[in-house]
Image: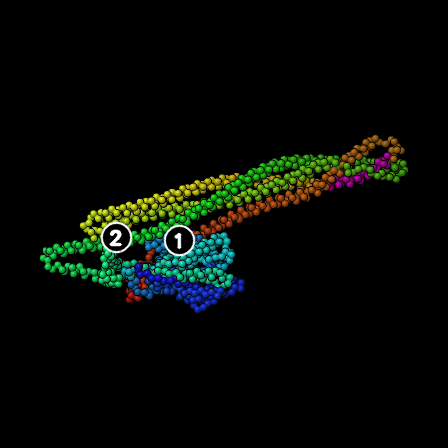
Amino acid sequence: MADPAECNIKVMCRFRPLNESEVNRGDKYIAKFQGEDTVMIASKPYAFDRVFQSNTSQEQVYNDCAKKIVKDVLEGYNGTIFAYGQTSSGKTHTMEGKLHDPEGMGIIPRIVQDIFNYIYSMDENLEFHIKVSYFEIYLDKIRDLLDVSKTNLSVHEDKNRVPYVKGCTERFVCSPDEVMDTIDEGKSNRHVAVTNMNEHSSRSHSIFLINVKQENTQTEQKLSGKLYLVDLAGSEKVSKTGAEGAVLDEAKNINKSLSALGNVISALAEGSTYVPYRDSKMTRILQDSLGGNCRTTIVICCSPSSYNESETKSTLLFGQRAKTIKNTVCVNVELTAEQWKKKYEREKEKNKTLRNTIQWLENELNRWRNGETVPIDEQFDKEKANLEAFAVDKDITITNDKPAATIGVTGNFTDAERRKCEEEIAKLYKQLDDKDEEINQQSQLVEKLKTQMLDQEELLASTRRDQDNMQAELNRLQAENDASKEEVKEVLQALEELAVNYDQKSQEVEDKTKEYELLSDELNQKSATLASIDAELQKLKEMTNHQKKRAAEMMASLLKDLAEIGIAVGNNDVKQPEGTGMIDEEFTVARLYISKMKSEVKTMVKRCKQLESTQTESNKKMEENEKELAACQLRISQHEAKIKSLTEYLQNVEQKKRQLEESVDSLSEELVQLRAQEKVHEMEKEHLNKVQTANEVKQAVEQQIQSHRETHQKQISSLRDEVEAKEKLITDLQDQNQKMMLEQERLRVEHEKLKATDQEKSRKLHELTVMQDRREQARQDLKGLEETVAKELQTLHNLRKLFVQDLATRVKKSAEIDSDDTGGSAAQKQKISFLENNLEQLTKVHKQLVRDNADLRCELPKLEKRLRATAERVKALESALKEAKENASRDRKRYQQEVDRIKEAVRSKNMARRGHSAQIAKPIRPGQHPAASPTHPSAIRGGGAFVQNSQPVAVRGGGGKQV
C-alpha cells in the first residue's frame, strides 16, 4: 500500500420540503439557512461541509456529495456514502430516488453510470473487473437480497483484518444496465412497511457494495477499491409512527443498531481507546468506513417541520460529532515481485544504518559509563545520521563502494596470496551477508512477533472485559432466574389451589347433574301421569256426551210427560225453581295433579339456573388458569433461550481464550528464544574467544526462559481454574433449567387433564341443553292440549248450567204434580238422582282444572323466557366459536399459500435471471461504451468498434477485430 494520509469524514446536510400531512397539520418551517454550510435551528447554528435546502435537485446533491469518490475508488481508494436521519426524512430518496428517471434518480444509479463513464475515458492499457453485492441488515440478521435463501450471514475478517460478509452473493458486471438490473432485483426483496409517517418505510439497513479491481497490462500494477453505498433505516418514535406487532419489533431493532452507530461515532469523536464496533453487525461491516482506510461521506437527512424538531436536532448533533472523525486512507495496491525486491533492499539498508547507529550509541554510552569523556567530534550527531539515512533512501548503491576499495589494497601480495586473500575476503563477505540477512529476518520476525503480541494482549484484554461483562450479565440473569423461580412457585401454588377448587366445583357439577337427571326422570313420570289424566279426561268427555244425550232424551220425555199432565190437569203455568247447586267444587281432582306438576317444574328450573351459574364460573376460572399457565410457559421458554445463548457464548469465549493463551505461550517462548539467540550472536561477534562468558549468558537466558514459562504456567493454571468454576456454574444452571423443564411438563400434563375435564363438562351441558329443548317441545304440546281442554270444559260448563236450570224447573214442576199424584214413576226419580250426582262430580273436576290452568299460565311465560334465553346464548356461543375456528383455519391456510406462492415466484425469478451456470468474470477495458448484450461477455478497449460474437471479443484501436 502507499503511504497513508489523514482526511476528515465529510458530512452533508439535506432538508426535505414539508409533506402533505405536515402542511395539513399547520407545522412551521423551522430551518433557517446561512450560506451554503450553515443552518439555524432554534437560533443555534450547525455548520457542515455543505447544507442543501429543500429545493436542491438530485443532480446537485450528487455532484457535491459523491462525484469525487468515483475517481478515488478507480484510483485504488475505498469509499463509503451513507444517509442518516429519522424515518420519513428522505434517506432512500437521496440514495436511490427514482431508479430509472434521469432527473429523479439518486446517488446510487448516478454513481454507477459515472463509474463506467470514467472507465471508458481512461488509458486503454488498463483492465477492470467489477463485482457487486447487495444485502440488508434486518432484525440484526444479514440477509442476501440477491439470494433470499441466505438469511443469516456472518461477518468475518480477511488476512488484513478487514471485515467482510461471508457467503454473500457476488455478481460480475460489465455495464450500467447489469448493475441496475441487480439493484432492481435486490430492491424487490427488501423489507418495507406502512407507518403513520411514511407509506414506504424501509425496515432494514441496505448496503450495496461495488468492488473494483484494476490491472495495468503493461506494468502489471494492480489496484483495488471498494465502494459502500448504504441506505440506513430511519430512527422511529413509536408514538408518532404508530408501530404495532412485527413493525414494532422492527422499529426496536432499527433504533438499537442506530444507537450502536451513535456510540461508535461518539467514541471516535472523543478519541476513546475502545470503540464498540462489535455492538451491531452494521458497525462491524462499516468498521473501515468509520475511522479506518476509507473516504467517507455522510448525508444527514432532516425534516424542517416543527413537529419533528427534537429528532432534527438529534440528527444535526450526530452529524457534528461525525465531522470531527479522521480516517487514514491509502491506495490499495498489490506490488509486483520487482517492487517487493526494491522495497526489501531499501528496508535492508535502513536496517543496517540503524544497527550501526545503535552500535555507535552503545560504544559512546559504555565510554561515558566507564568515566571517560567523549570529545564532541566523536559524539553521535543526529543531523548527520539523518542525512546519511536520507542518502541511503535516495541511492542504494552508495554502500557498495567500500568493499571495492578494500579489494584494491592487496596489490603488494603475490598472485597466489592475492587469490587466497580474495577468496577468503569473498567468503567473509558472503558470511557477513548471510549474517546480515539472518539478522534482518530475525529483526523482522521479532517486530512481527511484538506486533502480534500487542494485538494478542489487546485481544486478551478485550476478552477479559467481555468476560467480566458476561459474568455481570450472568449474575444478573441468575438473579432474574431466582426471581422467576419464586414467581413460578407462587404460580404453581395458585394453580394447585385452582385445581382443588376446580375439583370441588366439578364434584358439585356432577352432583347437580345427577339431581338434574333424577328431576328429568320425575318429569317424564309426571308427563306419563298427565297423559293418563288426558286419557281419563277424554273418557269423561265421552261419558259426559253420552250422559248429555241420555239427559236430553230423558228431558224430552219428561217435558212430554209434563205437557201431557198439564193438558190433563188444565194448568200450563209451571214455575222454574232456582238452581241451588255449587259449581266451584267440581274440578278438585284435576287441580291436585296440576299443582304437583307445577311445583316440580319450578324446582327443576331453579336447579337448571344453579347448574348454569356453576358452569359459567368454572369456565371463567379455567380461562384464567390457562392464561396464567401460558404466561408461565412463555417466561420459562424465554429464560431457557437466554441460558442457552449465554452458555453457547461462554463456551465460545472459553475456547477463544484457551486458543489465545496457547498462542501467547508459544509466542512468548519463541520471543524469549529469539532474544536469547540474538544475545548469543552479539556475544559471539564481540567476544569470540570468551566462550565461558557466552555459556553464562546462555544459562542466564535459559533461566529467564524458565521463569517466564513458570509464570505463564501459573497464569494458565489460574485461568483453567476460573474456566472450571464457570463450567461448574454452567452445569448448575443446566440442572436448574432441567428442573424447570420437568416442572413445565408436569404443568402441561395437568393443563391437558383440566382441558379434557372441561370438554367433558361442555359435552354434558350440551346433552342437558338438548334434553331441555325436548322438554320445551313437550310443554308446548301440553299447552295446546290445555287450551283444548279448557274450551271443552267451558262448553261443558255452559251446557251444565242450562241443563241444571231446565232440569230443576222440570223437577220442581214434577214434584208439584207428584204431590197431587203420588203414583209417579220410581224409575224417573232414580234417573234424576243419577244425573245430579254425575253433574256434581263433573262440576268439581272442572273447577279444579280451571284454577290449575290459571296458575300454570301465570308461571309458564317466565319459564319459557328463561329457557329461551339460555338456549339462545348457548347456540350463539357455539356458533361464534365454530365461526372463529373456521375463520382462523381459513386465514392460516390462505397466509401459508400466499407465502409459498411468493417464495416460489421469487425463487423462479432469481433462477430465471441467474440461471444454473457459474458466474464469469467480465473484464472491462477503457476506451468506449459497450454495445454488446450482457449475455456475451466482452473485453472493451479504446479507439475501435465492437463486434458481437458468441465468444469473448477484445476490440482494439483502428477498427480491427480480434477473436
State the quadrant of the C terminus: bottom left
Earlier along the polypeptide chain: callout 1 or callout 2? 1
Numbered tag placed on residue 253 in the rendering: none
Residues 790 and 341: in front is 341
Residue furthest out toward the bottom: 35
Quarter where residue 784 is shown:
top right
Q: Quickly name the residue at label 2.
A: 442
* Magenta-highlighted residues: 790-815
Where is residue 54 shown, x and y percent of the image?
46, 66
| Residue depicted at 33% across the width and 66% down the height | 121
| Residue depicted at 90% across the width and 36% down the height | 569
Quarter where residue 536 is shown:
top right
Where is residue 833 shown, x and y percent of the image?
81, 33
Instruction: Establish if 332 lies above or below 633.
Output: below
Instruction: Describe the element under mark 2 as helix, strand or loop.
Output: helix
| Callout in the foreground (1, 2) | 2
Please tell me whether the stretch drawn in magenta is mainly helix, strand or loop: helix
State the quadrant of the N terminus: bottom left
**391 horizontally vs 410: left or right:** right
Q: Quickly name the residue at label 1.
A: 278
Mark 2 packing: few (<14 Cα in 10 Å), some, or many (20+)?
Answer: some
| Residue depicted at 20% across the width and 51% down the height | 687
- Asked if the magenta segment contains residue 455, the reply would be no
- The three-letter code of the residue at mark 1 reads Arg
Where is residue 113 shown, x and y percent of the image?
38, 63
Residues 396 and 877: in front is 396
Instruction: Establish if 118 lies above or below 623.
Output: below
Instruction: Describe the element under mark 1 as helix, strand or loop.
Output: helix
Where is residue 753 shown, x and y percent of the image?
52, 39
Mark 1 packing: few (<14 Cα in 10 Å), some, or many (20+)?
Answer: few
Instruction: Establish if 821 lies above or below 436.
Output: above
